[in-house]
């Protein structure tokens, strides 16, 4: 087997806790600005996360949670306009530095770069949102560190479909055995495992009860040398934080 070639990261929930205080807030701002009384609470948003993709999530909301709202053939256009507004609010929010990276993310990305490990992204969120997070939470210009950014509508079927990971692998010209994926959710791991990628999970408040069957390792966070991760399942090979040494061991096991 060849050595580990690339790390492929999910964005929302994995690189940063963007859902509750980022995406959710931006959706509500878009609704308010459009004069709608839709209001997504922290709890409701947890249920809406069953569906990935902002446009798809709004359609799911109308279908299952706001059935009194009249829909017609103009509804897809309304959703599209709301989504554009939501993206504007979200990128504006991130430009203030409101959402930091999760523990260990910056350190791992730097270690990968120092060791010529290729890095890529596979996410359902809109490309502008990825750029906003990387440029403001990681480092100005860091978007260019990622060889492939697979995001949003580049594939029609979003996670849990494997398409976005397959698209990233295709662009990287790598086989899944050459890479590791990083995810935080059940839809995410269904997507990465569907593309035959070994997957490491870092849970968060919205995903801690999800089913991560098939994960190589499930952790509470990536950890830092001075603050260890907690292992929820899988073999941590005696490590207390994610670094390339641990990732190479997981890849080889
Ligand atoms: C996260 C998502 C996204 C965001 C919203 O997926 O489901 O839909 O919540 O983003 P991942 P958009 O963890 O795979 O990044 O509104 O831009 O679709
Ligand atoms: Mg995620």
Image (cartoon, rainbow, N blue to C red):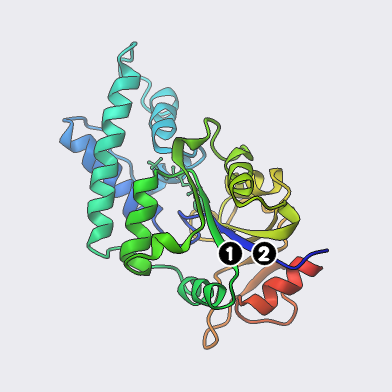
Determine which quarter of the picture holds residue 117.
bottom right
Instruction: Give the crowd class for mark 1: few <14, some 14-19, many >=20 residues within 10 Å.
Output: some
Q: Circle 2 sits on which residue?
A: 5
Residue 25 appears anywhere in the view:
yes
Asked whether, in this view, residue 65 is left or right of residue 226, the answer is left
Asked whether, in this view, residue 78 is left or right of residue 10, the answer is left
Q: Helix, strand, or loop for circle 2?
A: loop
Residue 235 appears anywhere in the view:
no
- 121 or 53, nearer to the observer: 121
Image location of residue 122, percent across then percent down:
53, 50
For the N terminus, give its image quadrant. Answer: bottom right
Determine which quarter of the picture holds residue 67.
top left
Image location of residue 101, percent across then percent down:
41, 67
Q: Circle 1 sits on which residue?
A: 118
What residue is at 63 percent from the left and 48 percent from the top? Answer: 169
What residue is at 58 percent from the left and 47 percent from the top? Answer: 171
Cβ atoms under marks 1 and 2 closer than 8 Å: yes
Where in the image, quadrant-wise, is ligand 1 located?
top left
> Image height check: is 176 above or below 82?
below
What residue is at 47 percent from the left and 74 percent from the top? Answer: 103
- 176 or 14, nearer to the observer: 176
- 39 or 173, nearer to the observer: 173
What residue is at 79 percent from the left and 65 percent from the top? Answer: 2
Q: Mark 2: is the Cβ under 8 angstroms from ligand 1?
A: no
């Amino acid at each position: 087997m060849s050595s580990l070639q690339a790390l492929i990261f999910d964005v929302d929930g994995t690189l940063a806790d963007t859902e509750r205080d980022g995406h959710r807030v931006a959706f509500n701002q878009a609704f308010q600005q459009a004069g709608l009384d839709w209001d997504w609470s922290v709890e409701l948003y947890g249920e809406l996360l069953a569906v990935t993709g902002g446009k798809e999530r709004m359609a799911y909301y109308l279908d299952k949670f706001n059935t009194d709202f009249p829909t017609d053939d103009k509804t897809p256009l309304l959703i599209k306009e709301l989504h554009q507004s939501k993206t504007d609010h979200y990128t504006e929010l991130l430009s203030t530095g409101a959402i930091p990276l999760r523990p260990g993310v910056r350190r791992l990305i730097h270690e990968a770069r120092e060791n010529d490990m290729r890095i890529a992204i596979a996410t359902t969120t809109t490309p502008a949102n990825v750029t906003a997070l990387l440029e403001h939470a990681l480092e100005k210009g860091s978007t260019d560190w990622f060889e492939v950014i697979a995001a949003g509508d580049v594939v029609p079927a979003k996670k849990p479909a494997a398409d976005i990971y397959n698209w990233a692998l295709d662009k990287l010209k790598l086989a899944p055995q050459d890479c590791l994926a990083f995810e935080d959710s059940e839809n995410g791991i269904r997507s990465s495992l569907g593309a035959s990628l070994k997957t490491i999970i870092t849970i968060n408040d919205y995903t801690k009860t999800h089913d991560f069957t098939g994960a190589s390792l499930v952790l509470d966070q990536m950890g830092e040398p001075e603050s260890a991760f907690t292992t929820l399942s899988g073999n941590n090979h005696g490590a207390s934080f994610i670094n390339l040494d641990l990732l190479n061991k997981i890849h080889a096991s």
